[in-house]
Image (cartoon, helix red, strand yellow):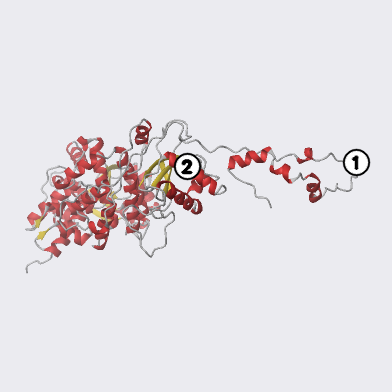
Amino acid sequence: MEDVSYQVFARKYRPRTFKDVLGQDHVVRTLCNAIEQQRLAHAYLFVGPRGTGKTSTARIFAKALNCTDGPKVDFDPDEDVCLEIAEGRSLDVQEIDGASNRGIDNIRDLRDNVQFAPTRGKYRIIYIDEVHMLTKESFNALLKTLEEPPAHVMFIFATTEPHKILPTILSRCQRFDLRPIPTEVIAAHLVNIARNEGVTLDEDAAYAIATVADGGMRDAQSMLDQLVSFCGNHITEQNVNDIFGVTSRETVAKALAYMLDRQLPSLLHLVHELSEAGRDMGQLLSELMGAVRELLITKVAPQEANSTLPEQWRATLSELLSRTPTDKIIRLMEVLSHAEEQMRWSTNKRLYLEMGLIQAVHSLAEANISDIIRALNGAPLPETPIATVPMAAVAMPAGSPTVPVTAPPVQSQPVPQPAPSSVPVPGPTTVAPQPIASAPIMPPGLEPIDDAPPLFGDMPPAEAEGATERPLTPEDWALLLDKVREASPIASGDIGHTLFISDEDGLVTLAIHPDDMNSYDALLGDTLNELISNTAQTICGHGIRLRIVTDDSVPPPQAVEILPPPNFEELAPAPRPKPKAEPQPAAAPQPQPAEAAATSLKPSDEEFYHDPLIEQALEIFHATLIKN
């Protein structure tokens, strides 16, 4: 009767000899040299992620030890002894699952059985998979046998979590760390398997499978098995994307181009399309971070770069990369890493992905230390507008390899440099402003929903009577602060030292000292923020939103010396001397009532309001006294 049982690819194409082991050359070479030189240890530990070849390597090693005329490297995998080991039928090679045989009784039985000599081969080999699952008592029961085993006994352990193994066990083993298999190696092996099976596997599809497998050959083979069942004899990259929610390399390159070119609406629209198509948002972010890493390596060390981006996108990305400084790419990676950390514990992954992408695009438009130094020397700040393409214009035909990546023209003017006496901030800026927080803002390029509640800091209409719409300047900011202080002395009392940096489409960036939290809280307060925006309307013709960054070169807030209150006793008439009373040990002295003392020492209202100390405090805090 014909055997109709089906064998999955992961078993059918399991390595049979050392030459078949892929991506673990350092392990194969060491084991082969140990066999040839007869320098065999009595305990080995294989460590590595799932699907990297721990069990396969252990079985191949066992075949090399117990083959005919062994140990030898070039054994015949089809001889009876080797077939028994491969199929788990050998009496001399005992494979144990550490998860289900973890008790001390199992280890005691094992310790007694290893005393028997092997039946056919030279060694009695004990292979324990997932050895970290053994209990502490089981490890201790194994210690003595592991340290001094019989000459014919060899232990081979495998684990994915070596930190859970007792140090006393680790010190008695030779450890081999199996690395994740490179993506290119997995893709090439999948193409070879498909060819042997009569299946046409596109190279892009093979690469997509290998990327999702993340270094695990077994996972990749299982995915290929599933794709053959779904697609038949021809597998494309689109099939991989549809089944496993993978984002294509072309889509990743397109999103990266939108990000570097600051086309935020197009980028968010692309994320919307991918989300509606069922793509994994976490996988998309991971792919974007990998592409940003590739660009960063290309920027700082081109000789070490290994481009995996589609050929048709490399010219566009190279042009965008040439005008993006390295520090901005590093900042981009930091923002995306933070978004990935937030997504890891959130159920709404798309929300945090969109927030991270918005912050990433805005980080590319922030002025850094180099920009500010050049500006202080007279050069204009670089023009870094964020594209504001209407949402209706970002629809892209499916499969189009190229999209316009040049931002639409945005009126952006360099920030005028203040005269030496125009802004009272001494010294040049020498520390890069680092954003600590900002008021919630509507991202440029996105129109607010008509019936949505107004955002904090919403800008009033651009038209103002008597004012021409133009970017805010440092001189305008100084004038604006004076007007705000006149209009609301109490609310604006804490906004002391601020350094105007730029005005980009109504988004005004200010720098404060890192310790000036009073200015930070006041500038982002609801009442003062609305007053500042309305005042700017009268000066430059449009409202503004505030972004606060920190800069050590900005003067710190002045430490307010807490002066003692006026000595009203010196101002009051001296009290009449009282006759000296005899001490009364039994009775405590009676204090003078507070109200009576205050009445007798209270100065007149005019003396209090015009006291020099009071006037000094009012000047420091920009405050006024209200008479009751």
The image shows residue 283, relative to residue 379, as above or below, that is below
In the rendered view, would you say 272 is above or below 335? Answer: below
Left or right of 523? Residue 505 is left
Residue at 53% over, 38% down: 557
Q: Residues within 10 Å of mark 2 (few under 14, many from 20)?
A: some
Percent x, y for residue 78?
10, 52
Q: Earlier in the sequence, mark 1 or mark 2?
A: 2
- The outermost residue toward the front is 466
Q: Is residue 261 above or below residue 451?
A: above
Left or right: residue 185 versus residue 163 is left
- The residue at which mark 2 appears reads as 479
Residue 598 place in picture, x, y as percent: 78, 47
Frontmost of labels 1 and 2 is 2
Check disc 2 and report its element: helix, strand or loop.
helix
* Residue 77, horizontal then vertical, whole percent: 12, 50
Q: Residues within 10 Å of mark 1 (few under 14, many from 20)?
A: few
Q: In the rendered view of the protein, which quadrant contains the N terminus? A: bottom left
**Quick one: SS at disc 1?**
loop
Between residue 203 and residue 196, name the one nearer to us.
203
Q: CA distance from mark 1 to mark 2?
A: 61 Å
Residue closest to the eye, 262 or 6: 262
Give the residue displayed 42% in from the left and 31% down from the top.
428
User: Front-most of 87 and 499?
Assistant: 499
- Residue with the mark numbered 1: 578
Which three-letter amino acid code belongs to the residue tagged 1? Answer: Lys
* Residue 153 visible here: no
> What type is the residue that disc 2 sits on?
Leu
- The one of 184 and 208 positioned closer to us in this rendering: 208
Left/right placement of residue 8 relative to residue 46 reads left
**Residue 473 at least partly seen:** yes
